[in-house]
């Protein structure tokens, strides 16, 4: 009986901890990621940290990912496609950071 009680208590504790761990790293939807990157590009343009050619290039890359997202979503977005989009957004995010901090000003 004690073993069963300990098992149930352990499972209850695990069930309480796992959701809180998952919420520690919030998941952003594709639209949120696009919006956040667009805001960062806009801020870089306004502050002068992004030059016009850099901003044009970043916007073109954003359009390419948006077109790819559209193609993926036509057949339903799979986990692999979601990961591919995340990887591409991560790369664009890194380029935004690099371009904003490369000491080129308009």
Image (cartoon, rainbow, N blue to C red):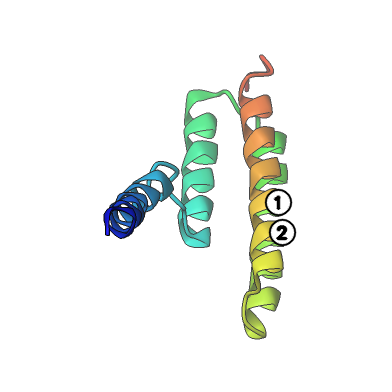
Side (left or right) of 37 relative to 70: left
In front: 7, or 93? 7
Residue placed furthest toward the front: 1
Looking at the image, residue 51 lies above or below residue 6: above
Q: Residue at x 72, y 59 (%)?
A: 84
Q: Quadrant of residue 74?
A: bottom right
Q: Which mark is residue 88?
A: 1
| Residue 41 horizontal/vertical position (percent) | 55, 39
Are dots 2 and 1 in contact, CB under 8 Å? Answer: yes
Number of numbered labels in the structure image = 2
Q: Quadrant of residue 95?
A: top right
- Mark 2 sits on what residue? 84
Look at discs 2 and 1 and give the one toward the viewer.
2
| Residue 83 horizontal/vertical position (percent) | 67, 58
| Residue 88 horizontal/vertical position (percent) | 70, 51
Task: Sort mark 1 into few (<14), some (14-19) or many (20+) by Cα contacts within 10 Å.
Answer: some
Which image quadrant: the N terminus?
bottom left
Side (left or right) of 42 relative to 67: left
As measured in the structure, the alpha-carbon distance from the residue carrying label 2 to the one carrying label 1 is 6 Å
Residue placed furthest toward the top: 103
Which image quadrant: the C terminus?
top right
Q: Secondary structure at mark 2?
A: helix
Q: Residue at x 67, y 85 (%)?
A: 75
Q: Residue at x 61, y 25 (%)?
A: 100
| Residue 42 horizontal/vertical position (percent) | 50, 39
Task: Sort mark 2 into few (<14), some (14-19) or many (20+) by Cα contacts within 10 Å.
Answer: some
């Amino acid at each position: 009986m004690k073993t069963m009680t300990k098992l149930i208590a352990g499972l209850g504790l695990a069930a309480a901890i796992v959701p809180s761990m998952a919420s520690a790293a919030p998941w952003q939807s594709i639209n949120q990621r696009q919006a956040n990157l667009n805001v960062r590009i806009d801020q870089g343009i306004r502050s002068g940290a992004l030059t016009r050619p850099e901003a044009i290039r970043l916007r073109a890359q954003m359009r390419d990912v948006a077109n790819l997202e559209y193609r993926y979503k036509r057949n339903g977005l799979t986990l692999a496609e979601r990961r591919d989009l995340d990887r591409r957004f991560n790369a664009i995010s890194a380029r935004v950071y690099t371009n904003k901090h490369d000491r080129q000003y308009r």
